[in-house]
Image (tube, rainbow, N blue to C red):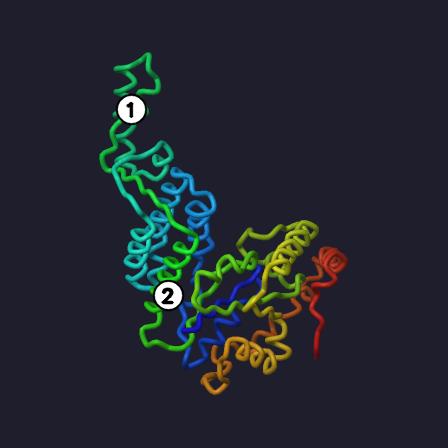
Amino acid sequence: MQVITCVSFHSTGSSVVDDIFKECSNCVSAPSDIECRFLQDPDGISDLEYNLIDNPHRLNSEFAIKRYMRFVKRYSHTYKFIFGNEWERKSKEYINALVTVKYRGFWFRDLELMPTKELIIYWFKRIITLIKNPHKRIAGYYVDCPREMFFHSYLTAERFTTLTKSYVRGLCEALNPENKPFVLLDQCVPTSNIQRYTKYFDNIKVIVVDRDPRDVYIEHKHSKDHVLPNSPKEFCEVYRDQRNMFFASNKDNVLYLWFEDFIYNYENTVNRLFCFVGQSSKEHSEPQKYFNPDISAKNMRLWERYPQYRGDIEIIESLLPEFLYKDKN
């Protein structure tokens, strides 16, 4: 089973890869509007590895496990759209495998994750304890939390990677009950430090899609998100830094493509994509059903349609000349 993931720098059009593989009969994919970010998100698998392997302090480790447990539950409604009920079941199995000892106990940071009802009970007990022991302020901390568990984990890096690979493999199998040769997950690794995440897979190919900064800037100006800066100079700094982080990383099993090439050089770009992942063009059974370059061409060179941003565009052209797409027509 070959896992494919498409990633972007934000608003650079990586969904084109989703659309093209949806047109293939031998590929299964999650709903295209759901990003599969549980490896890279805060409190996700990478954070878990840092606290269990790179910085395995007993308190950090147990707190990281609880944070991932909360992550699984909090975003269950999202990941069930991808992995079904196996999301919670496989996650529980994975957490149990990471924990080597479990016992009743807690430390004060656990209060941040405690359910509201139990937190109220804790503070009630603590206040009573402080009233009874007014001269021993620390005594209020040591109140009983009978339902709190402490999770101890001691693993080698190799063992953590093995368990995580098994976990990720199981989730991909849940998405792929027909055992198709290709599974596509959207945004499951970041554009920076890619190799930290590819080790969690048996076999993965990463496609990074980039886009002319002028179009990215204009699209951002007309979107409702606030991920990128509104100032053109600050935008350029963020744009460049994100690419520098990508180009500085190990790019084994990574293909870098321009979104514009899917429009202006469609056949060659799709062939490059299929060759990279080992896909046969014969399996492209419904070409242009989900991605039609003629339709998408209407959203190209957006900066030419908004003369009010001409000054901003000139700044971007002067600061990011090497990232401007060179029209190959």
- The quadrant of the image that shows the C terminus is bottom right
Q: Is residue 295 left or right of residue 103?
A: right
In the displayed structure image, the side of residue 20 where residue 179 appears, left or right = left
As rendered, which of 144 and 29 lies closer to the eye?
A: 144
Residue 49 position within the rendered picture, expressed as x and y whole percent measured from the top left: 44, 50
- According to the image, label 1 marks what residue? 126
Residue furthest toward the top?
Answer: 135
Q: Which residue is mark 2?
A: 169
- Which quadrant of the structure image shows residue 2? bottom left
Look at label 1 and name its amino acid.
Answer: Arg
Marks 1 and 2: in contact by CB < 8 Å?
no
Q: Quadrant of residue 308?
A: bottom right
**Residue 95 location (% of width, % of height):** 32, 52
Whether residue 218 is visible to the viewer of this picture, yes or no, is no
Tell me, for residue 50, which label it has, or none. none
Task: Name the residue at the left extreme.
Answer: 146
